[in-house]
Image (tube, grey):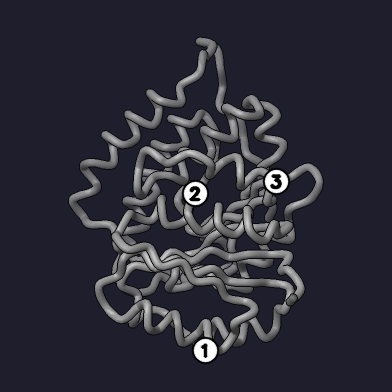
């Protein structure tokens, strides 16, 4: 029986046949024998499944493939992958990335290295700063900043980027955070923060999270999120806040999530 990987990376895929680079995944897996990738084919209607099966044949010991019969949305695809890997393989660390690898697999591992006995949840942050390469259309960047600021206020946490598709957890906390289905197909990242706060309490949750500025994030292709969702987004946020709301003091001030430069 092959050695169980210490790190699993879940990749949700929906009609990604042109975006998936088998070369990138192969190079990464050859250089990182301690890591495995779990592709979740989310009911794709193109040749995504065939592309994934080809990559799996090349690395049968490091790739898992979950074919969902119908499209369920990113939240459920990620959830299914996280639960499958944690329950069947019990890796030390597990997380997820977008299939186009806007955040590279190597960068995922760098974010993962910030987990320790105290920090159980790390997430990448697309902060434009000297020394980093964050390539994103200005229009999307501005809209993203508006949404991120609004989400930060709802969470009462000074998180710069809740929606970056690079998040990694210890296996134990992943099982807890992904046990139940999410309210929103696209804003489930926000729910992860609420679940952390609900489980640990706000002050303890902050000690267990770390926001890591990415060195590189390259926007690739078109987003699967339809432009019309911008209007539904606010409704999703309302229901998320209503579901996870906790008692708050009138004098409460937002906490600051620790950021590693």
Query: In the shown orientation, is residue 153 left or right of residue 168?
Result: left
Cα gap from disc 3 to disc 1, whole angstroms: 31 Å
Q: Position of residue 77 (x, y in %)?
A: 42, 57
The residue that label 3 is drawn on is 120
Quarter where residue 213 is shown? bottom right
Q: Secondary structure at mark 1?
A: helix
The image position of residue 11, as x and y in percent, is: 48, 66
Q: Earlier in the sequence, mark 1 or mark 2?
A: 1
Label 3: few (<14), some or many (≥20) within 10 Å? Answer: many
Of tags 1 and 2, which is closer to the observer?
A: 1
**Residue most toward the right?**
117
Q: Position of residue 151 (x, y in %)?
A: 42, 37
Q: Label 1: which residue?
A: 23
Q: Is residue 140 left or right of residue 159?
A: left
Along the viewing direction, whichever of 42 and 256 lies nearer the viewer: 42
In the picture provided, is 132 more to the left or to the right than 226?
A: right
Which mark is on residue 161? 2
Q: Earlier in the sequence, mark 3 or mark 1?
A: 1
Residue at 79% in and 50% down: 116
Q: In the visual, does 228 lie left or right of 143?
A: left
Q: Is residue 251 above or below residue 100?
A: above
């Amino acid at each position: 029986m092959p050695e169980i990987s210490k790190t699993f990376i879940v990749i949700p895929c929906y009609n990604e046949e042109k975006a998936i680079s088998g070369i990138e995944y192969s190079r990464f897996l050859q250089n990182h024998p301690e890591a495995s990738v779990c592709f979740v084919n989310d009911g794709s209607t193109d040749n995504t499944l065939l592309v994934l099966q080809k990559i799996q044949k090349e690395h049968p010991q490091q790739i898992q493939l979950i074919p969902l019969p119908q499209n369920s949305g990113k939240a459920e695809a990620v959830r299914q992958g996280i639960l499958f890997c944690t329950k069947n393989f019990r890796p030390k660390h597990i997380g997820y990335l977008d299939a186009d690898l806007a955040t590279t697999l190597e960068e995922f591992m760098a974010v993962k290295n910030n987990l320790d006995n105290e920090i159980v949840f790390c997430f990448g942050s697309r902060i434009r700063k000297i020394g980093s390469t964050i390539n994103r259309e200005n229009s999307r960047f501005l809209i993203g900043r508006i949404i991120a600021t609004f989400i930060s206020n709802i969470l009462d946490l000074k998180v710069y980027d809740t929606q970056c598709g690079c998040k990694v957890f210890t296996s134990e906390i992943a099982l807890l955070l992904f046990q139940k289905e999410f309210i929103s197909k696209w804003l489930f990242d926000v729910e992860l923060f609420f679940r952390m706060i609900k489980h640990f309490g706000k002050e303890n949750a902050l000690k267990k999270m770390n926001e890591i500025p990415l060195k590189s994030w390259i926007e690739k292709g078109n987003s699967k999120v339809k432009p019309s969702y911008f209007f539904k987004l606010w409704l999703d946020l309302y229901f998320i806040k209503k579901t996870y709301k906790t008692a708050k003091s009138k004098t409460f001030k937002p906490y600051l999530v620790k950021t590693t430069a």
